[in-house]
Image (cartoon, rainbow, N blue to C red):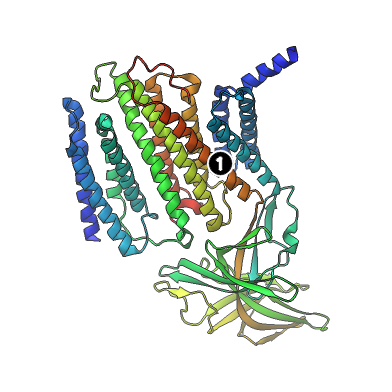
């Protein structure tokens, strides 16, 4: 009996509105700290959010005695659902990015990723191919629309194709794949080692274009110590800053490759014979950067938010329709409650 | 472009006259007339024409530069207030508080660069329009609440010297402001919601702790706090008036300040 009374008293205290206000202040502070990267969002926001959840549960338990408006119950219940879903989202989400050269398929490995501890690793089964893209640029190198052809297997022998771009992701197995402004050129090389023990083919992704107009990068031929600086040089001005243009592979171009003090100009099909092997510049391709996003709570979150706004609307209608806002001073006594 | 500027200046002229008539009405104790609404409405019409001309010329709406955002929000704020002015005769004297408050915004708008803008590809979605319209309604509701709040603050600060007898009593203004904030919460919530939907497909995530998102959340939390202060503490009416005013000030600073200080993707002028 005494325990029950103590428990009720504790719940009463936990559900108090002043506690709600203090926790909201903490959440405001936590949000700001998270945005400034002073604290991890999970800590800075998760703790006050969790405490607000307790405050909310206590309020629902204490006040659920038939006297509370159903609209308030629905509103705060939806709020609690949003809090719980936020927690589940942080445990199960994945976010990352990758780059694919034209013709290349994604095979499950992201360049960088962050994921919740309960993310189930379905990424390994995700397969899609970059089949080429174009991006339109307005004068001033201002990026406009992107159209990226994508293919993915639906069975062992059939492929499905689509065009994705800004605001139009590819959705596969719950993963959402987005094109980005991060894209550029990728010279394709073949390397044959001197003892012909290995023949490799690979692309070198140059910096994002036109964000970095100087298209050069350093890379090392695999399984060697040959460190090359590669620069892409356009003939003429295929991407004028004062005109509109579409991102494309310029036909007239060459590569400047520098190894130590030696500089070599290479055009598609040309070969550089070295002591360690033979490097062939095959062709110039493009690469596209993609963002990958996964969050299984998204549709549930949307449903909870719809219930939240619907119940808020219901509450406002009930509350405001019941009494006029304009009263004389004598009769205005107890109307400050929600 | 010259026509757009001319229409804009004429519109601002109409707003200034409306505000002047409203303010002098309070000082002279004269009941507000339809002249205020007439000048306000004319200003809104001219202003709408200026925005429409620019929209037709550029091929996109006023969403990018500081000038465009100030201009479109000034129009929507004044439109919301004009609706309240027409609908609630007993609140018309609030124009003496609301319109001069917006004079600052008008001055700021006229000082900003009128340069042309380009719509980023991530803005080419219906969710932009939904998000922006909901945000404007929220800010409009907060502005009307601020008008009522300023009236209560004026009565309290003057210690009875300024009665504002043509306006409803403090309990009524307090209730009206509270309801405006509650309506504002509904639209602010929907604005955040639609913003998240837009962000999901524009930037590949519905929430990323970018500066504008965080401050929008802070604004929403502040509004929730404001609505809970009244039932929790039952403060004096002037305190509620101050809280209502702070909601608008915080919202204004966030929506007009943060996008132009932040370098994050959601800064509005990428």
- Residue A53: percent from the left, percent from the top? 63, 32
Residue B23 placement: quadrant:
top left
Local crowd size for mark 1, using a 10 Å CA cut-off: few (<14), some (14–19), many (≥20): some
Res. B256 visible in picture: no
Residue B82 placement: quadrant:
top left
- Chain letter of disc 1 in the image: A
- Residue B143: percent from the left, percent from the top? 35, 36
Q: Nearer the viewer, residue A70 or A263?
A: A70
Left or right of A1 in this view: B90 = left
Determine the residue positioned at 18% across, 34% down.
Answer: B33
Res. A172 visible in picture: yes
- Residue A76: percent from the left, percent from the top? 57, 33
**Mark 1 lies on residue:** A307
- Residue B176: percent from the left, percent from the top? 36, 29
Q: In this view, does B195 lie above or below A316?
A: below
Q: In this view, does A338 lie above or below A124?
A: above
Left or right of A312 in this view: B112 = left
């Amino acid at each position: 009996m005494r325990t029950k009374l103590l428990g009720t008293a504790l719940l009463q205290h936990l559900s108090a509105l002043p506690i709600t206000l203090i926790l909201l202040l903490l959440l405001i502070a936590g949000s700001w700290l998270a945005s400034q990267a002073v604290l991890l969002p999970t800590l800075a926001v998760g703790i006050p959010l969790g405490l607000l959840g307790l405050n909310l549960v206590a309020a629902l338990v204490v006040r659920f005695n038939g006297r509370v408006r159903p609209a308030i119950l629905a509103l705060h219940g939806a709020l609690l659902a949003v809090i719980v879903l936020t927690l589940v989202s942080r445990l199960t989400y994945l976010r990352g990015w990758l780059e694919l050269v034209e013709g290349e398929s994604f095979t499950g490995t992201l360049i960088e990723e962050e994921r919740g501890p309960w993310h189930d690793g379905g990424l390994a089964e995700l397969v899609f191919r970059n089949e080429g893209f174009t991006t339109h640029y307005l004068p001033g190198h201002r990026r406009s629309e992107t159209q990226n052809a994508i293919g993915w297997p639906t069975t062992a022998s059939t492929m499905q194709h689509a065009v994705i771009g800004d605001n139009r992701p590819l959705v596969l197995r719950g993963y959402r794949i987005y094109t980005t402004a991060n894209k550029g050129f990728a010279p394709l090389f073949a390397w044959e080692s001197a003892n012909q023990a290995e023949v490799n083919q690979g692309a070198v992704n140059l910096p994002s274009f036109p964000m970095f107009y100087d298209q050069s990068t350093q890379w090392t031929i695999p399984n060697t110590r040959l460190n090359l600086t590669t620069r892409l040089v356009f003939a003429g001005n295929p991407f004028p800053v004062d005109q509109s243009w579409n991102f494309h592979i310029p036909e007239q171009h060459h590569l400047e490759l520098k190894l130590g003090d030696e500089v070599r100009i290479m055009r598609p099909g040309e070969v550089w014979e070295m002591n360690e092997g033979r490097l062939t510049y095959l062709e110039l391709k493009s690469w596209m950067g993609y963002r990958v996003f996964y969050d299984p709570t998204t549709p549930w979150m949307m449903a909870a938010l719809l219930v939240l706004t619907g119940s808020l609307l219901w509450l406002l209608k009930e509350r405001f329709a019941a009494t006029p806002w304009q009263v004389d001073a004598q009769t205005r006594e107890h109307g400050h409650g929600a | 472009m010259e026509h757009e500027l001319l229409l804009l200046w004429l519109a601002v002229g109409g707003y200034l006259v409306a505000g002047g008539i409203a303010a002098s009405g309070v000082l002279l104790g004269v009941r507000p007339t339809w002249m205020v609404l007439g000048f306000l409405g004319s200003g809104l019409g001219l202003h709408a024409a200026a925005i429409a001309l620019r929209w037709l010329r550029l091929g996109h709406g006023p969403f990018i530069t500081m000038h465009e955002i100030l201009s479109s929000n000034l129009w929507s704020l004044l439109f919301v207030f004009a609706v309240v002015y027409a609908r609630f005769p007993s609140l018309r004297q609030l124009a003496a508080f609301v319109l001069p408050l917006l004079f600052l915004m008008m001055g700021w708008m006229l000082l900003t660069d009128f340069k042309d803008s380009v719509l980023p590809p991530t803005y080419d979605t219906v969710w932009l329009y939904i998000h922006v319209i909901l945000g404007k309604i929220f800010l409009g509701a907060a502005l009307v609440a601020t008008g009522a709040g300023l009236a209560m603050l004026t009565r309290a600060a003057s210690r009875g010297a300024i009665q504002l007898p043509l306006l409803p009593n403090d309990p009524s203004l307090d209730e009206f402001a509270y309801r405006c904030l509650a309506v504002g919460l509904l639209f602010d919530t929907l604005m955040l919601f639609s913003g998240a939907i837009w962000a999901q497909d524009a930037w590949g995530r519905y929430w990323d702790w970018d500066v504008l998102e965080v401050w929008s959340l802070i604004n929403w939390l502040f509004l929730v706090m404001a609505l809970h202060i009244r039932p929790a503490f039952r403060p004096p009416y002037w305190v509620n008036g101050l809280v209502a005013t702070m909601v608008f000030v915080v919202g204004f600073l966030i929506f007009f300040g943060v996008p132009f200080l932040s370098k994050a993707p959601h800064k509005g002028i990428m």
